[in-house]
Image (tube, rainbow, N blue to C red):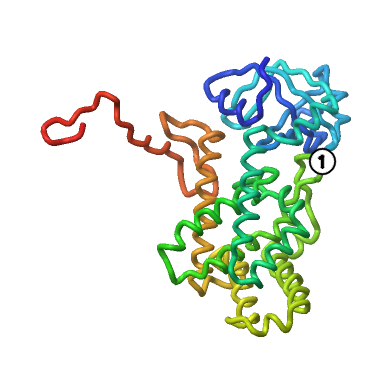
């Protein structure tokens, strides 16, 4: 059997049962009981990009073993995988075994393509903040990355809907920065320094709200994240770092324009307004061009990621039509393929065919 990721298995299983092996971490193991009173164990299994549920019935040979698993357990699941219309990815005729230390370490590194992408994205983030011209915003961003960079690289951009994998926040942030740099020349009224800093910090509270453990793919719940929320945490992160930098550079900053207080307030506004509406969790709605731009860039990247994930995981309803993936507004329809000109296309009747 080929060793695949959960996402690869899910895609292949759309067309029928797939024999495969997958390396996973146990996210949770919960003892449950059917209506008829039959006990079973429900495992939530996760790899770097995806997760699935495995129901272990009491008469399965591995029931006792699986009932004793914990979130620190790493294992190989081998069997025939299929996609159930109601329950999602399932396994039949399966066996499990613990991973070796080497296999565990390789799993934690993630697939080679994802690892390369996230490393490139992190490098782009660092390079982008280094070219911020306002020394206050540049210093603030550099101080944040220096202090919290390792935690940033483990965080997800969301718990469920988009970029919900380990390192997803890096991917989301880097892509937002790419978009901002592309549109800035088209809208010269935008303060790109401020917009880039806002993108870096807009989800900085997710470092606590959506944080993965240092040694696995379990996204822990954090009391600070639950009680305060990522927007409020982000505001405090900026204020805390700003106070420290301001105290160290008081005399130098006095000679800068616009005033340091204006810069701080506008950056805080970008963080507070990035959800766009009070009904969606923002304490204030966007009131500056940079705040509005950040909101739409954030929304665009998250929604397109939902489409990409939906095509891979949603139940097919018909050719090129998939079941709805919330919070997207309706059923998904596959994108129109890009135009391709065949090699023997000729110009006839004044038209390019």
Name the quarter where the N terminus is drawn: top right
Return the x and y of residue 311 as percentages of the image width and height: 51, 36
Residue appearing at x 75%, y 59% in the figure: 146
Rendering coords of residue 265 (x, y %)? 62, 77
Is 194 on the left or on the right of 28, as rendered? left
On screen, residue 55 above or below 274? above
Q: State which quadrant residue 218 falls in.
A: top right
Q: Residue at x 50, y 73 (%)?
A: 288
- Give the residue displayed 85% in from the left and 36% down from the top: 72
Nearest the eye: 182 or 21: 182
Q: Residue at x 60, y 54 (%)?
A: 173
> Which residue is situated farthest in the left direction here?
349
Category of crowding for the residue at label 1, using alpha-carbon neighbours closer than 10 angstroms: few (below 14), some (14–19), many (at least 20):
few
Q: Split into 4 quadrants, where in the image is the C terminus?
A: top left
Q: Position of residue 89 (x, y in %)?
A: 63, 28
State the count of labels.
Answer: 1
Q: Is residue 123 above or below residue 201?
A: above
Dot 1: element = loop
Residue 264 visible in the picture = yes
Residue underneath mark 1? 215
Up-down: is 277 above or below 17?
A: below
Q: Is there any visible trace of residue 38 in the rendered image?
A: no
Q: Is residue 336 left or right of residue 290?
A: left
Image location (x, y in percent) of residue 83: 59, 26
> Which of the 4 image quadrants contains residue 23?
top right
């Amino acid at each position: 059997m080929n060793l695949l990721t959960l996402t690869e298995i899910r895609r292949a299983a759309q067309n029928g049962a797939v024999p495969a092996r997958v390396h996973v971490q146990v996210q949770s193991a919960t003892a449950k009981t059917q209506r008829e009173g039959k006990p079973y164990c429900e495992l939530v299994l996760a790899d770097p990009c995806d997760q699935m549920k495995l129901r272990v019935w009491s008469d399965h040979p591995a029931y006792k073993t699986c009932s004793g698993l914990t979130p620190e357990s790493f294992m190989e699941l081998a069997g025939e995988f299929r996609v159930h219309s109601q329950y999602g990815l399932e396994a039949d005729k399966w066996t499990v075994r613990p991973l070796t230390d080497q296999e565990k370490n390789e799993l934690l590194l993630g697939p080679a393509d994802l690892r390369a992408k996230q490393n490139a994205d992190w490098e782009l983030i660092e390079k982008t903040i280094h070219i911020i011209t306002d020394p206050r915003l540049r210093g603030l961003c550099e101080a944040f990355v220096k202090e919290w960079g390792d935690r940033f690289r483990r965080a997800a951009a969301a718990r469920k809907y988009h970029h919900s994998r380990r390192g997803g926040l890096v991917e989301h942030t880097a892509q937002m920065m790419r978009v901002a740099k592309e549109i800035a020349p088209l809208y010269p009224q935008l303060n790109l320094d401020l917009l880039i800093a806002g993108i870096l910090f807009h989800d900085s509270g997710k470092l606590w709200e959506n944080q993965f453990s240092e040694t696995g793919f379990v996204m822990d719940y954090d009391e600070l994240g639950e009680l305060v929320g990522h927007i409020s945490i982000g505001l405090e992160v900026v204020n805390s770092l700003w106070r420290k930098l301001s105290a160290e550079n008081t005399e130098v900053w006095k000679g800068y324009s616009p005033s340091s207080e204006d810069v701080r307030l506008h950056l805080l506004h970008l963080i507070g307004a990035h959800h766009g509406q009070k009904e969606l969790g923002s304490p204030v709605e966007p009131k500056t061009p940079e705040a509005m731009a950040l909101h739409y860039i954030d929304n665009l990247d998250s929604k397109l990621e939902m489409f990409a994930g939906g095509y891979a995981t949603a139940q097919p309803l018909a050719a090129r039509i998939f079941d709805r993936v919330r919070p997207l507004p309706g059923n998904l329809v596959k994108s129109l393929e890009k135009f391709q000109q065949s090699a023997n296309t000729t110009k006839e009747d004044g038209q390019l065919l």
